[in-house]
Image: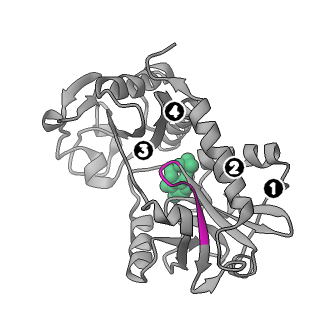
Amino acid sequence: MALKIWLDGKLVDEDEAKVSVFDHGLLYGDGVFEGIRFYSGRVFRLEEHISRLFDSAKAILLKMPWTHKEVCDSVCETIAANGLVDGYVRLVVTRGAGGLGLNPYLCETPSMFVIASSITLYPEEYYANGLSLVTCSTRRPTHGSLSPQVKSLNYLNNVMAKVEALKAGAMEGVMLNEQGCVAECTGDNLFILKNGKIRTPRISDGALDGITRAVIFELAEELGIPMTEETLTRYDLYTSEECFLSGTAAEVIPVVAIDERPIGDGQVGETFKKFLEAFRKLTQSTGTPVGGA
Ligand code: PMP
């Protein structure tokens, strides 16, 4: 069945959901986006995702013509219109149609569309058996270029790093910053366990301030496991006892090898399993009701 897409305030069939070839989102990657999950008819961390979207837009001087509430409502409306209960939402805001030059001020009206569908980032077996990662040579953009905090439509850096990982036979790759310190993976944040403590790269080291990353901090507190942000190097990864990733699409997923070196004993870790269980419980029991309740 054709999906209903929310496009600039209207729900249209997917065949009719079109943006201009002059849209600067397409011409220059000039725009921002969010990926959001919904579970059992409730949108997980909706407010946080929409706040980050507004921050990304503000950082690139893209004036949102919709309020925070209107954007939240558009997500719920799209899910409801498609009769979905569990799935993934892609929310995109483009600079809008303009001239064949960079000048964003010639783009009169930003465009927004919302797709609600399903996503399977990694096959189920990886959640049980763990991922093998490789370190990519493509670096995470520095704070001196486009801030890595902006979830912009220009993801080519991450796409190129993902290609490196896939060519090396890995499903995901570790991205370093210009100093050679660990930033994150191409679409997920990274965590290690050492001596009973969870450690994750600092935002200032190039990690995205992930919504799921924040959930991991909450769960660590709930589970009574100490957790800190730290500058990490590949040495820290190679000598860790456990490693796992977090992301809206990936949820939480274990890592058992990096650059062909086993992490810990090369098996999915017991601490990870606690996080997975707590994460699943949380996603099934919280969120913004799609029908508004
Ligand atoms: N890093 C990058 C580069 C990402 O694109 C994502 C996915 N948005 C993440 C980390 C994970 O962030 P979140 O938990 O907010 O999905």
Q: What residue type is labelled 4?
A: Ile
C-alpha distance separating marks 1 and 3: 30 Å
- Residue 50 is labelled as 4
Q: Which of 141 and 168 is in front in this view?
A: 168
Q: What residue would you read off at disc 1?
A: 227
| Cβ–Cβ under 8 Å for marks 1 and 2 | yes
Give percent across and percent down for residue 106: 28, 38
C-alpha distance separating marks 4 and 1: 26 Å
Give percent across and percent down for residue 91: 39, 38
Magenta part, dominant SS = strand
Q: Is residue 132 left or right of residue 63?
A: right
Q: What residue would you read off at disc 3?
A: 32
Q: Nearer the viewer, mark 4 or mark 1?
A: 1
- Residue 219 is labelled as none
Q: How crowded is mark 4: few (under 14 residues within 10 Å), some or many (20 or more)?
A: many
Disc 4 within 8 angstroms of ligand 1 (CB): no
C-alpha distance separating marks 4 and 2: 19 Å
- Residue 216 is labelled as 2
Is residue 251 rendered magenta in the image? Answer: yes
Residue range in magenta is 248-255
Specify whether residue 150 is in view.
no
Disc 1 within 8 angstroms of ligand 1 (CB): no
Q: Which amino acid does label 1 sit on?
A: Met
Instruction: Find numbered disc 2 in the image and state the secondary structure of the residue it sits on.
Output: helix
Disc 2 within 8 angstroms of ligand 1 (CB): no
Q: Which of marks 4 and 3 is in front?
A: 4
In terms of sequence position, does the residue under pointer 4 or pointer 1 come before the other? 4
In terms of sequence position, does the residue under pointer 4 or pointer 2 come before the other? 4
| Cβ–Cβ under 8 Å for marks 1 and 3 | no
Q: Nearer the viewer, residue 11 or 291?
A: 291
Is residue 230 rendered magenta in the image? Answer: no
